[in-house]
Amino acid sequence: MPREQGRKLVASNRKARHDYAILDTYEAGLVLTGTEVKSLRAGRASLVDAFGHEKNGEIYLHGMHIPEYTQGTWTNHEPRRVRKLLLHREEIHKMIGKLRDDGVTLVPLSVYFENGYAKVELGVAKGKKAYDKRQDLATRDAQREITRALGRRAKGRD
């Protein structure tokens, strides 16, 4: 049976990009059980309140919710268990170095399947202040208004 190709998005954490300034991104594999994979393939996962943490030179993902597989039996998994992330040693060392700074955290941005393997996109992030969030919204609105005006002008309505 051929392995599936391409990238299939399972869940994304849109609020993370609003609440944090993403400094750097990494792609990591996930250590999962069979029922977790089946539940993910059904498109069921939540990254709300999830975060990455370093322990004994390895990176773990806390708080990610993968609901129990409906057809699972006594072998079903715990929905919010701590999951190990698979990264290269150099990436882990770089990440740990960045996480030592004040106010910097590890946030999952999305979970997806790439060529049949479950992956998570991690962001090394620094929390935004309320005024930063308002400034980003104002900038986005201004850019949208400029695009609209240019579109109207090109169509000859202005």
Image: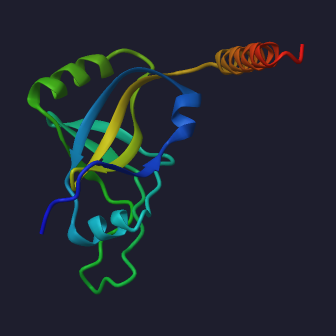
Please give left or right for residue 132 compared with residue 31 in the image. Answer: right
Which residue occupies the foreground of this view, 32 or 8? Answer: 8
Give the number of marks: 0
* Residue in the image at 89% along x and 18% along y: 157
Please give left or right for residue 7 compared with residue 151 in the image. Answer: left
In the rendered image, the vertical position of residue 59 relative to residue 92, given as above or below: below
Q: Quadrant of residue 53?
A: top left
**Residue 82, x across and y down, in percent:** 29, 54
In the rendered image, the vertical position of residue 131 relative to residue 82, given as above or below: above
Which residue occupies the foreground of this view, 77 or 44? Answer: 44
Q: Quadrant of residue 80?
A: bottom left
Which residue occupies the foreground of this view, 66 or 41? Answer: 41
Please give left or right for residue 117 compared with residue 10 in the image. Answer: left
**Residue 18, x across and y down, in percent:** 59, 29
**Image quarter of the C terminus:** top right
**Residue 149, x across and y down, in percent:** 80, 15
* Residue in the image at 27% along x and 46% along y: 119
* Residue in the image at 41% along x and 16% along y: 102
* Residue in the image at 43% along x and 24% along y: 125
Please give left or right for residue 53 compared with residue 47 in the image. Answer: left
**Residue 139, x across and y down, in percent:** 70, 14
**Image quarter of the N terminus:** bottom left
Task: Spot the residue most to the right.
Answer: 158
